[in-house]
Image (cartoon, rainbow, N blue to C red):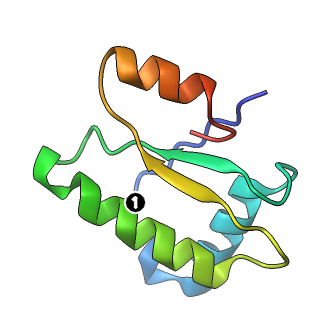
Amino acid sequence: MIKYVLQSGGLQKNSQKVALFFNETVKGLGPKPKVLLCFFAEKRGNWEDKVQQYSERSMALLKGNVQPSFELALPADEFEEQGKMSDVV
């Protein structure tokens, strides 16, 4: 089962909520969940930077031995295939 998470931004203003958000996102998905990050609402030139920022921040805040992998969502047919291979979008 794929977990879908919608996040509109603004979390960086409260570090406790950021940690809670990241930990809840991967909760119950095992030690190595596959996370597909979708930034379609952002300018295309920002997507890679956003993936790096989210990856680094979440790795620093995750509790336990959870080591997710992060992938940048791509539009069209790629997105559908990527979603099938992910634990959380």
Rendering coords of residue 15 (x, y %)? 56, 85
| SS at badge 1 | loop
Query: Looking at the image, is 37 positioned above or below residue 63?
Result: above
- Horizontally, residue 32 falls left or right of residue 70, namely right
Q: Look at the image and tell me whether residue 61 can be seen.
A: yes
Rendering coords of residue 71 (x, y %)? 46, 48
Name the image quarter holding the N terminus: top right
Place residue 61 in its image quadrant. Answer: bottom right
Rendering coords of residue 8 (x, y %)? 42, 51
Query: Looking at the image, is 6 positioned above or below residue 53?
Result: above
Rendering coords of residue 65 (x, y %)? 83, 75
Residue occupying the point 43% across, 81% down: 13
17 and 76: which is toward the camera: 76
Q: Which residue is mark 1?
A: 9
Residue occupying the point 75% across, 60% down: 24
- Horizontally, residue 71 falls left or right of residue 22, namely left
Amino acid on which disc 1 is placed: Gly
Query: Looking at the image, is 44 positioned above or below residue 27?
Result: above
Place residue 62 in its image quadrant. Answer: bottom right
Residue occupying the point 37% across, 68% down: 52
Taking the view exactly as shown, the residue that stands out farthest to the top is: 77
Place residue 25 in its image quadrant. Answer: bottom right
- Horizontally, residue 23 falls left or right of residue 48, namely right
Label 1 packing within 10 angstroms: few (<14), some (14-19), many (20+): few
